[in-house]
Amino acid sequence: MADLPLHDHAQSEGAADADRGFVAKLSPAVVKDADGRVIWDNDAYAFLEQECPATAHPGLWRQSRLHARQGLYEVADGIYQVRGLDLSNMTLVEGDTGVIVIDPLISTECAAAALRLYRDHRGERPVTGVIYTHSHVDHFGGVRGVTGGGVPILAPAGFLEHALSRNVYAGPAMTRRSVYLYGPALPRSPEGQIGTGLGLTRSTGTVSLIVPTLDITRTGQEETIDGVRIVFQLTPGGEAPSELNFFFPERRALCVAENVTHNQHSLLSLRGGPVGDARGWARHLTEVITLFAGSADVAFASHHWPTWGAENVVRFLSRQRDLYAYLHDQTLRLMNKGLTGTEIAEAVRLPPGLEESWHTRGHRGSVGHNVKAIYQRYLGWFDGNPAHLWEHPPRDRAIRYVKCLGGGGAVVALARRYIAENDLRFAVELLNHAVFADEGNKEARDLLAEVYTRLGHGSENGTWRNLYLMGALELTDGIVPADIDTGSPDLVAALSVPQIFDSIAIRIDGPRAWHERLSIDWHLTDLGERYRTTLSNGALIQQADPPEQDVDLTLRLTKAQFLGLLTGKGVEGVDREGDTGVLRRLVAVLDNPVPDFAIVTP
């Protein structure tokens, strides 16, 4: 994308809206957990008030500077937001007797601090309801910081399934990769971590979950909480598998969740996950414009700052809609002309009307990796070229390439030539081969770290910057462990029984279990549910309401006892019939994830 003039930040597009409605800051803007550990520090980003240095892209610097504004803001009559106390915003809507909380951040500690800031300036209103806009942890994890339950908890249909499966099935891999996405080990400085596009970073406190009490199942559904009438629109499959927008008719205020933010969003997070539906996303935005935008005086979201004025709201939503529709349609057009995802990513350029808007810039997603995501959604990993059908794995391929090029020293020399020509992209490819062929090649590692740093400093995309800089850090200092635990007790307790069996099945070490045959019936007495699990040919098969037949072991237990078995508490107190030794045999073939696996080295 072409660079836009930075201008003075006070005059930049969005700055006035980011400041509008300011009530008060949290000072100091530091949140600690019960042990005194800092889990959020907005003050660490004070350096963003400096002029943009050579070590940062001006667009990302501007975006992060706007993110660094923190405190309580008035959005509309009776609607407030706390921004800058986590990756996401927490919105508070005043009702007849209390306040409704929308998206209570990631951590309970940050959510409690945000609620305290609100109450300090608006009074001790009780929390009378909670709305989760979608199934990502930064929109529900802090809920126990604002309520212990006993109030309506609203969420889109499918919320619980998607919120839990995201953290269970591929949780270890995604958590490891998210270290690169957010850069927790990077210094907060002009040379280090300066933001993520959606916000500055994520908090690292206690993640919680209260199961929703009311599902939103259809567009047009109306609910009244604490005297506040709300009209909902379901938007599944775009930014999140389960998500919703909603409108407050009496306040003429529209919440667009994370479906519309002041940047181009990512259709596929670089930490991994399901690919979003760009076409469906665009259609949801057309629908929200039709349903609500003409009646809305303000549109606010779960990230960034609001947009005021009916005409501005429609223009903003329309350009965001056009962005995702354009990316989808142009990718399909070129895909059907035979271009691969990588080739399309180089070919697609946004139209001037979109490229010249700050809010379509690639601070979080980007044209290149969104195009590749759309290609992946339709055609998968294989580009049709037989040469790519059965490639060697990275280390084996690297060894062969380095040998062909004359050895590690020759590859480093070639990389230096491409660096001198400012072809950093190919220099990275060469140096990556050198490191994967011989991870002890210090010259290659140091030079690759240097190039990663240069690429990071030049990136407009916050997550790209963090990925490059984290890659450099791990090459020089070693692996940085994850800084957040998404396997909190609340999340584990909320798993359905089938999801628990799924979490066991994906840990079966297939070869070790090839010759094991065992079957267990599980009677969940408090749930009134019956399941059978069968280990067969290295696969754990589950079946609900199985037919009567002989099994190796029958267990009659509560869900709490079931979870206790998984944490090693044993079968004491569990009604059982048959051979309890099959539990030991099952445990013996379970494999454990490796939470801190290598990424930039073999």
Image (cartoon, rainbow, N blue to C red):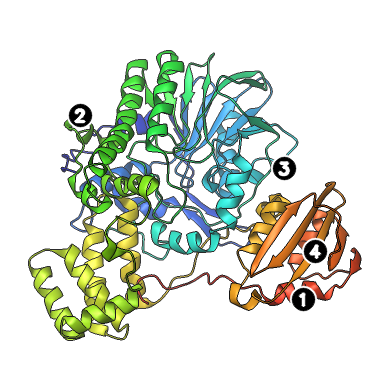
Mark 2 vs 3, N-terminal side? 3
Q: Secondary structure at mark 4?
A: strand
- Judging by the rendered image, the residue that carries numbered circle 1 is 584
Q: Amino acid at mark 1?
A: Arg
Mark 1 is surrounded, within 10 Å at the Cα level, by few (under 14), some (14 to 19) or many (20 or more) other residues, namely few
Identify which residue, 6 or 357, lies in the foreground. Answer: 357
Residue drawn at point x = 34 percent, y = 29 percent: 321
Mark 2 and mark 4: Cα distance apart in space: 61 Å
User: Are the residues tagged 3 and 4 within 8 Å (C-beta)?
Assistant: no
- Judging by the rendered image, the residue that carries numbered circle 4 is 520
Labels in figure, total: 4
Mark 2 and mark 1: Cα distance apart in space: 63 Å
Mark 1 and mark 3: Cα distance apart in space: 38 Å
The picture places residue 235, in percent across and down from the top left corner, at 49, 31
- Judging by the rendered image, the residue that carries numbered circle 3 is 148
Above or below for 250 versus 188: above
Mark 3 and mark 4: Cα distance apart in space: 36 Å
**For the residues carrying marks 2 and 1, which lies nearer the camera in this image?**
1
Q: Quadrant of the N terminus?
A: top left
Q: Amino acid at mark 4?
A: Ile
Q: Secondary structure at mark 3?
A: loop
Identify which residue, 214 or 20, lies in the foreground. Answer: 214
**For the residues carrying marks 2 and 3, which lies nearer the camera in this image?**
2
Mark 2 vs 1, N-terminal side? 2
Residue drawn at point x = 32 percent, y = 24 percent: 318
User: Are the residues tagged 2 and 1 within 8 Å (C-beta)?
Assistant: no
Identify which residue, 214 or 517, lies in the foreground. Answer: 517
The picture places residue 433, in percent across and down from the top left corner, at 26, 75
Identify which residue, 68 or 446, lies in the foreground. Answer: 446
